[in-house]
Amino acid sequence: MTQPTPASPPAPSPATDVVLDVQDLYVGYYRDLNILQGVNLEARKGQITTILGANGVGKSTLLKAIYGFLRPNSGEIRFEGQDIQDVPTHERIRLGISYIPQQPGIFRWMTVEENLELGAWTFRHDRERIRRKLEENYERFPALKDRRHSKAGELSGGMQRMVEIGRTLMTDPKLILVDEPTAGLAKLLSEMVYQMLVDLRDLEGLTIVLVDQEIRYALAVADYVYVLELGRNKFQGPVSEFTDLEKAFWVG
Ligand SMILES: Nc1ncnc2c1ncn2[C@@H]1O[C@H](COP(=O)(O)OP(=O)(O)O)[C@@H](O)[C@H]1O
Ligand SMILES: [Mg+2]
């Protein structure tokens, strides 16, 4: 009698868990004046990929290009294997990409709930889905439920970030692009925001690309790190290899 052979585990296929794949990207704001000059970036499923770099190197520009706000002069942007170069932003949202810009985008005179509902623009006629997504958000962030009828402008900076994150989650994103989410926030509020990102990764399996200037926090939550310099990749590696800060930074 032949022994049953134990089922072998599926061979690891590192390529398949790449959610976002940016190759050799050249993009800028005016004609062929490229701010990014051949940038590469991969973001893997369920990981936080952090992009660091000094002011003005092009971190926000990179996120805008991934979201479709800027059209690259050359290079490739793939999302789940699909070339999205010609896909407009509202379609990228449908595919599962969302973006939280560097400038806070809260509508201060609207309520928390109205701000959340703005995230449902792409399915604004589907009241039932909107209701479901609001409930999910209130379960995720009970503090928002308590304040749902408050004007967003009355909330703390950290809670306002929570509203923005909640709004972006209305569309069921698979990939969230977050640009300096704690700029201008006090330490405790910053920690709350990073904890939200970690929870989205660990509890909901979301893939996050985080642009940050808060090196210490950014490294504490990152799985993989990129450093940009003058529109190019300077360093990349798993966070565990990212011990020599000076290799990457001006750190003082
Ligand atoms: N809307 C814009 N129009 C023209 N140039 C811009 C615009 N936004 C940013 N830039 C320029 O692009 C470069 C990169 O900016 P940015 O991507 O915002 O850098 P970072 O986010 O890394 O601080 C900077 O030199 C900046 O002046
Ligand atoms: Mg920026």
Image (cartoon, rainbow, N blue to C red):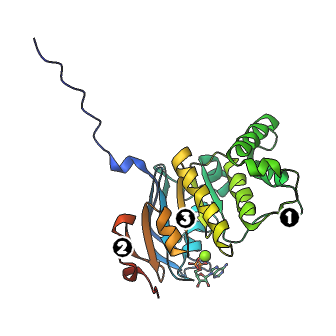
Distance from disc 3 to disc 2, alpha carbons, whole Å, reads 19 Å
Give 75 or 51, whichever is nearer the viewer. Answer: 51
Distance from disc 1 to disc 3, alpha carbons, whole Å, reads 26 Å
Give 227 or 68, whichever is nearer the viewer. Answer: 227
Q: Nearer the viewer, mark 3 or mark 2?
A: 2
Mark 3 lies on a secondary structure that is strand
Mark 1 lies on a secondary structure that is helix
Residue at 84% x, 50% y is 148
Quadrant location of residue 111? bottom right
Q: Quadrant of ligand 1?
A: bottom right
Q: Earlier in the sequence, mark 1 or mark 2?
A: 1
Residue 174 left/right relative to 160? left
Residue at 72% x, 59% y is 164
The label shown at residue 243 is: 2
Q: Is residue 197 above or below residue 7?
A: below
Residue at 73% x, 41% y is 133
- The residue that mark 3 highlights is 210
